[in-house]
Image: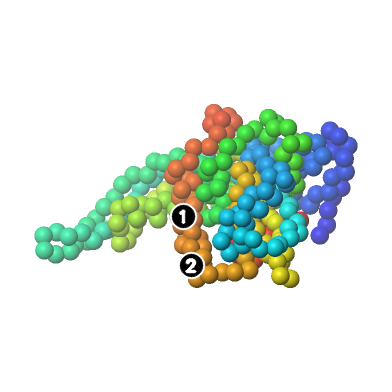
Amino acid sequence: MTFLSYSCRNCGANIDVQPDNLLTICAYCGDVHAARDISDLPVHIVPSWGKQHVTAALQQRMANDPDMRGVSYEIQSVEGVYVPLYINFVEVQGGWHGTARELQGNRTANVPKGGHINHRGDFPVLARKHAHEFGLAQLGPLISHAQPVPFRSVAWKDVALPVLSVDVTEGEADATVADDVIDLLGEQIREQNGLTSITAFDATARVQSRFILLFPLWTAIYVYAGGSYRVAIEGSRPSVLAAMEPVFQGQRIRRFFATLGATLGAGLVWFFGWPMLASGGRDGEVALVFIAMLL
């Protein structure tokens, strides 16, 4: 992989970045280097706890797990990164028509229905083109409970982690928002109105404002009985998100898939239920669905 090297304008440290990276944060002093394309976007961060607290969360998880309690294991590594996202404040307007099956007297009939769309909300877009490890279905519920703050308000030395590159442009983010928000609204309207079909759907999604959010995710590797296992950990609380384990009982497997299914609507949870603070007026590998480091 090709990297470009330059010196931090604030502390003089050497910085290596990918050529298409639009946002670089100096790992030493936290100075923000943004490409002209996104230089006017505010940057917010969900501060991460440090390695010691993240390791303690993993150890507590192991101690509370009936299958792992008392088991001898060795934590091999614990590493964290900030995952960048665009948080877009989106306004959607339009209308829809469809049909629903309803009981009328002693027979079932197709009943026409329709309505207007006038909705506002925050919607996340991953700011990385190659980040299949970070699914919004999993990140959505986590970020919706986070407390982001303006980047300049944090003491970088207390929360410093590598920041993954931003290589999605604002135009590409706009296109993603336009497609995904309309799809999510259509599904919500279908479910809420019991529609068997949508015959017409005319809606326009416009991004009114956006900012960049840095969200902390960690991965730990532990060794047990000659095997290596990964654990994904959310850094803002911190808490274990998902783990590979030596023992998988049938009940655990069923619980995992039930939890995974519940997260699939995370985009809807985000868009329809979470007020986000922002500047400018709205101030493997089982997770490896969540995180498999790209460093």
Q: What amino acid is found at the position of numbered circle 1 in the picture?
A: Gly
Q: Is residue 234 visible in the rendered structure shown here? A: no
Q: What amino acid is found at the position of numbered circle 2 in the picture?
A: Gln
Front one among 165 and 76? 76
In the picture, measured across the screen, residue 282 lies left or right of residue 155, that is left
Mark number, residue 164: none
Residue lying furthest left: 105
**Residue at left offset 48%, top offset 67%:** 251
Observer-side mark, 2 or 1, equals 2
Front one among 262 and 35? 262
Q: Earlier in the sequence, mark 2 or mark 1?
A: 2
Give the answer, above or below, for where 158 lies relative to 96: above
Q: Where residue 149 appears, x then y in whole percent?
A: 62, 34
Mark number, residue 251: 2
Circle 1 residue: 265
**Residue at left offset 73%, top offset 46%:** 51
Badge 1 crowding class, 10 Å Cα cut-off, few under 14, some 14 to 19, many 20 or more, is some
Q: Quadrant of residue 110?
A: bottom left
Q: Is residue 76 visible in the rendered structure shown here? A: yes
Determine whether the residue tagged by mark 2 lies in a helix, strand or loop.
Answer: helix
**Residue at left offset 48%, top offset 41%:** 274
Determine whether the residue tagged by mark 1 lies in a helix, strand or loop.
Answer: loop
**Residue at left offset 45%, top offset 50%:** 268
